[in-house]
Structure formats: C-alpha cells, structure tokens
Image (cartoon, helix red, strand yellow):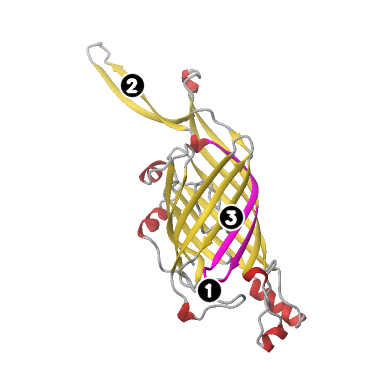
Amino acid sequence: MSERVNGIVGARIWGAVAVALLAVAGARRGAAQSPFSTAKADGSIVLDRGGFAQATFDEALFRVGYELDRRDEHARDVRARHPTEEVRFGPRYGLELQARPGGSVAALLRSNELVSGGRAVASFGLGNVFSTQPSTAELVAGRLPAQPLGLVYDWITVEAGVERTTFTLYDATQPYAAQFASRDFSGYSLTAHYNAEFGGRVPTIAGVSVGVRKTNNADELAAVSITDTHVITSPDGSVQRTYSDVRQGLTGDYAERRPVVLNTDVVFYPFLVAPPAGATLAPSGLKASVAFDVFTRTTLGADARFVPGLGAFVTAPGAPLRVYGGVTVYRGRDKSVASNLVAGFSF
C-alpha cells in the first residue's frame, strides 16, 4: 500500500485542469498536502510521500504540494549503526501552495469571483510512530516485525500555514462614497495530523486532525451587483446621454474568527489487494483503484458546525494516496446536499 516514489512525473492530467492551472491568478484556503480535499475544508489525511496538483471546481481552488519522505534514508542510517534495532520515526517534510483566482476564471468554474488570494503551508512529521521497519538482523533472517493492529505504516504531521485574501464588501447603510470597501485579510493555521494505513481484506487509511485557524466568513456572504447610471447633457441642453457601469461586492455581516477544527477521514479501498503488514506488492499487482472516503468536518466554538460526507476517488496504481480525481457529497451549510468535483495528477 505505501507509495514508492521513483521521481517519474505522472502523465494523467485531466484536460480541464491543465487549462485552469495556466490561468491561476490568486488563491485561498484548502487542504494542506491532503489528497482528499472535501467539503470546503482541510482533510485529515496527509500525503505520505511525493507530490500532486489538484483543482477543486466548486471553489476554483488550485493546489500544488510535495511531501519529502526520508524514511528510507533514516532506515539505512539506523540499520548501519544499530543492526538489531527496528526502525521508527523517519522524518518527513512538506510544502503546499494554493491559488484561487478571481474574475472570469472563477466565474467560469461557478465559484465566487469576488474573493481571491493565496496560501502557503509547510509541514514536518515523523513516520513509523507505532509501526516499525525491520532491523538488519530481521532482514537477514527473512522476518518482518509484528505490527500492532495490522498496521502497514503510520505517520504524524504538524502543519503551519499563512494566507492572504482580497475581497470587496458592500454596505448600503454607509455614505455613498464609502459603500464599497476593499478588504485584505491575513490568516494563519496550525494543525496536527495522525494517519494510519492498515492491511487486511479491505485496505484502509484512517486520519484525524485537530487545530486552530484564523479565518473569515467572506465565502458565506451574498454577492450583489450594483448598477450606477450616469447622465451627460450636451452644452445646449438638447441631448442627454446615459451610460451604466456595474460594481460587485459582498453583503452581510462580515466576521473574522479563530475556531478549533476537528476533522476525520476513513478511506476504504475495496478493490485493492493489500500486501502483508510491512511488505509491498509486486509490480504485477499494482493497478489503479477506487477509494471511498467517509469523512467529517467539525468546527468547534461559537459558530459550531458538523459536516458529514462521502467521497469517491480514483487513485494511481500501487499508490493509494495519489489521487487522480473524484467527487464528494456532503451536507451544506443550510443542511441541503452539496457536491464538489476534484481533478488533478500526482508526481
């Protein structure tokens, strides 16, 4: 199940994603190094190694991330120094950049074109927290270490992110000249993730994350269009000309908040043949598969919210965390059913 990165760039790029990525001009929030971006919120599962590029069409959000996993180098060093010691705590580093365009690109994707900006997320983690890699002595003897609860691999990750967005607010109660106001927002996030990969008849990856984030409700405000009509009268007063221009803004009670967020994911691979704990599949057994993600996205505090959902994703051969694309269905803010489409490629 665990990915083995060979540095070869994946060649499957959905056509619509390729065009959209070229048009990126700004950005917003999303999921940090998470291949399962769902319900307009961060996923709890962090990519174990390698990179990806994704587009989330409902939000017009574009993401590029890379996770550098040093478990193999760490294992070689431990085995050289301590031949009888099983290997744990291999370091991992990650970076993700997110982009959300405004204007015509966002409108083409049926998103809110009045909010644009950017976000960067850096991460550090450790692999083999409760699971282990074999020692030199075990490798020589042809034995694999016993793993608790059928673990194949597990990892923890701490992520820190900063973001900046720009949008325009409209308030009809203000004096005429001040009704439209441009706002810049600077936010941050700090989250901790634990992920575990299990073998068995139905391979599974589970994740939980908890953190805090400074955010706002700009995406929840209503967009309005105001038409200004201008009249020009000729010098002799005999002719009048009129022209109009349209200005757009967000209306409603704008607020900034710092909620605690708690997210969970349980991803099943019912069509994937799992290797034994601590082992890997032969190349002949590596095939593309379908992953089903049962997830929750929870916001705690004054603006508490609980969002359950289900996603279906196509993953790369032998790499269950390399997502080509998929669709998610979840409960929207007004308790209606909402959906979202994600597409991309891995490398």
Circle 1/circle 3 CB separation < 8 Å = no
Drawn side of residue 105 relative to residue 121, left or right: left
Query: Is residue 286 in view from this perspective?
Result: yes
Location of the N terminus (image quadrant): bottom right
Of badges 2 and 1, the one in the foreground is: 1
Distance of mark 1 from mark 3, alpha carbons?
A: 22 Å
Of badges 1 and 3, the one in the foreground is: 1
Per the image, label 1 sits on a secondary structure element best described as loop
Dominant secondary structure (helix, strand or loop) of the stretch shown in magenta: strand
Magenta span: 192-217
Residue 229 - label: 2
Query: Which residue of the protein is positioned furthest toward the left in this rendering?
Result: 238
x and y percentages locating residue 329 in the rendered image = 44, 50
Amino acid type, mark 1: Ala
* Residue 213 forms part of the magenta stretch: yes
Mark 3 neighbour density, 10 Å: few (under 14) some (14–19) many (20 or more) = many
x and y percentages locating residue 325 in the rendered image = 43, 59
Q: Earlier in the sequence, mark 1 or mark 3?
A: 3
Placement of 168 over or under 78, stated as above or below: above
Residue 44 - label: 3
Query: Which residue of the protein is positioned furthest toward the bottom in this rendering?
Result: 141
* Residue 95 forms part of the magenta stretch: no
Amino acid type, mark 2: Thr
x and y percentages locating residue 218 in the rendered image = 51, 36
Drawn side of residue 61 relative to residue 138, left or right: left
Q: Earlier in the sequence, mark 3 or mark 2?
A: 3
Distance of mark 3 from mark 2, alpha carbons?
A: 50 Å
- Check disc 1 and report the residue beneath it: 274
